[in-house]
Image: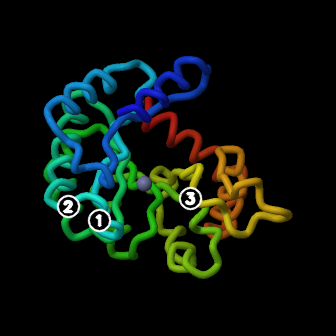
Amino acid sequence: MEESRQAIELAQANEGLFATAGLHPHSARFYCESLERDLRHLLAQPPVKAAGEMGLDFNRDFSPRPDQERAFEAQLAMAAEYNLPVFLHERDAHERFLPILKAHRDAIPGAVVHCFTGSREALFHYLDLDCHIGITGWICDERRGKPLAELVHNIPDTRLLLETDAPYLLPRDLPGAPPKKRRNEPALLPWIGQRVAQLRQQPVATVARLTYTNATTLFS
Ligand SMILES: [Zn+2]
């Protein structure tokens, strides 16, 4: 909640910035009634354009899985109530994640599968649910990003989004010396866009235009 509050304050103080508010699956064990009350208050703030990150992470398992599912479902229901799109985190949890999302999807105005790194099958399941697909600098990693690089051309123009996941996931193929502390930042988004454009065989300017339009439309 404190991090969501800080993001909202930053957005309020800087024109052109917006925020999300939510409980990450890593912290799902802290979900309770008072947290839900606080979260409702944050979701109603004008800079908040989406609910999340929310979802399931069965890779790290920092919270027990039943807690993760409970917090995920509760936040999906809240997003529907506040008519907000959702910012989704799923890692190694596709099988449980899909039916839960599906049950709520029609009630929610939009959904981003953020930092998508899943399989071809998972990608098409999410597209079937009319989700947007967020691509990060993961795709710039020549080894672990390879499966994603081979999939990215399957994302329709209207469902592609670019993200940094800053401060994480500094693109591995940046030219020159890496930034101090290896901190990723939004300024590196064009580098990811360039790689995505190359893989989709589209001009960089086209990818820039369509991902910008997708973001502003999805987040109103
Ligand atoms: Zn995430």
Q: Is residue 205 visible?
A: yes
Give me the disc on residue 61.
Answer: 1
Instruction: Where is residue 195? Give x, y as percent.
Output: 68, 64
- At x 60%, y 81%, the residue is 143
Identify the image quadrant of the C terminus.
top left
Lower sequence index among marks 2 and 3: 2
User: In front: mark 1 or mark 3?
Assistant: 1
Element under label 2? loop
Instruction: Where is residue 54? Give x, y as percent.
Output: 31, 48
- At x 61%, y 21%, the residue is 14
Estimate the spatial distance between the alpha carbons at disc 2 and disc 3, rounded to whole Å: 27 Å
Q: Are marks 1 and 3 in contact (CB under 8 Å)?
A: no
Q: Which residue is mark 2?
A: 64
Instruction: Where is residue 142? Give x, y as percent.
Output: 64, 78
Give me the disc on residue 136.
Answer: 3
Tell me the kind of residue under disc 2: Pro
Quadrant for ligand 1 reads bottom left
Image vertical order of residue 54 relative to residue 156, above or below = above
Element under label 1? loop
Tell me the kind of residue under disc 3: Thr
Identify the coloring. rainbow
Tell me the kind of residue under disc 1: Asp
Estimate the spatial distance between the alpha carbons at disc 1 and disc 3, rounded to whole Å: 22 Å
